[in-house]
Image: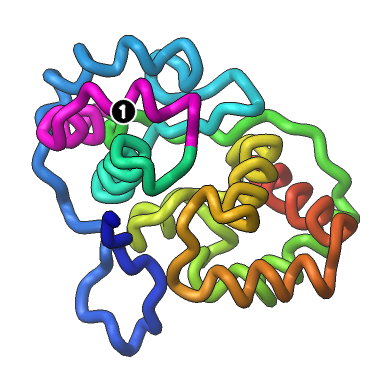
């Protein structure tokens, strides 16, 4: 099984950020991502709430996830057929292309009061790994996916996949996610999603 990149470490233990530069040719990648545009947008900015935006993603994170889709470490009937034909080198080229694109937060409705509650929940349960409110800047630095401004229908689906074992949970996710759902339930999830949606 693929070894997941460790994305959550105490700052005192880290000499360099995990989002290190990855080899890849963005021009070659531009030619390879045509099949991705229907769901993720031509430049990785999704217009479909159930599909994540991937513009600006850290290259190492992008390749890691693509390999996971390719080898079945992340269970996804939608992504597996797309990922399987690509070599690692091609994935690195695609990653280089998306890394050069501009992250655009999804335009979503949210409840300001719930968003404030969600901010507190994020800091309590998610903030150790998803720093700076889950921003893209922090995601790039720590080689992980952004939460702030991502489509919340997609985030709900991804969270459910973690809980159902369809995505591998590493770096402390199991106890934190389980504690979140046990203590906060659906109401807490709604507030958390409103917080991420509010960051536009």
Callout 1: helix, strand or loop? helix
Q: Is residue 136 magenta?
A: no
Q: Position of residue 200 (x, y in %)?
A: 64, 40
Q: Is residue 80 magenta?
A: yes
Give the main secondary structure of the magenta stretch: helix
Q: Position of residue 126 (x, y in %)?
A: 61, 68
Q: Quadrant of residue 121?
A: bottom right
Quick check: 133 left or right of 122?
Answer: left
Q: Tell me if residue 43 comes above or below residue 181 in the rendering.
A: above
Quick check: 80 left or right of 84?
Answer: right
Count of picture labels: 1
* Residue displayed at 47% across by 22% down: 40
Q: Tell me if residue 157 comes above or below residue 44 in the rendering.
A: below
* Residue displayed at 15% across by 36% down: 88
* Residue displayed at 63% across by 51% down: 159
Quick check: 36 left or right of 76?
Answer: left
Q: Tell me if residue 13 comes above or below residue 7 in the rendering.
A: below
Q: Position of residue 168 (x, y in %)?
A: 46, 58
Query: Looking at the figure, which quarter contains the N terminus?
Result: bottom left
Residue position for label 1: 83
Q: Position of residue 90 (x, y in %)?
A: 15, 28
Quick check: 122 left or right of 100?
Answer: right
* Viewer-proximal residue among 140 and 183: 183
Residue lying farthest to the bottom in this orientation = 12
* Viewer-proximal residue among 63 and 146: 63
* Residue displayed at 72% across by 45% down: 198
Which segment did they paint magenta? 76-97
* Viewer-proximal residue among 147 and 177: 177
Neighbour tally class for label 1: few under 14, some 14-19, many 20 plus, Cα within 10 Å: some
């Amino acid at each position: 099984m693929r070894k997941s990149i460790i994305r959550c470490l105490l700052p005192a233990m880290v000499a360099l950020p995990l989002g290190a530069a990855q080899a890849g040719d963005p021009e070659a990648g531009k030619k390879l991502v045509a099949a991705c545009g229907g769901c993720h947008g031509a430049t990785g900015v999704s217009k479909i709430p159930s599909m994540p935006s991937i513009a600006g993603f850290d290259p190492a994170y992008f390749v890691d996830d693509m390999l996971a889709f390719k080898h079945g470490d992340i269970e996804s009937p939608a992504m597996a057929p797309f990922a399987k034909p690509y070599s690692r080198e091609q994935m690195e080229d695609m990653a280089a292309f998306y890394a050069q694109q501009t992250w655009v937060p999804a335009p979503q409705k949210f409840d300001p009061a719930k968003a404030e509650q969600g901010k507190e929940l994020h800091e309590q349960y998610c903030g150790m790994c998803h720093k700076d409110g889950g921003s893209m800047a922090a995601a790039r630095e720590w080689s992980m996916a952004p939460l702030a401004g991502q489509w919340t229908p997609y985030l709900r689906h991804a969270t459910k996949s973690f809980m159902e074992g369809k995505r591998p949970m590493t770096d402390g996710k199991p106890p934190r996610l389980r504690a979140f759902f046990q203590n906060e339930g659906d109401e807490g999830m709604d507030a958390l999603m409103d917080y991420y949606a509010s960051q536009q």
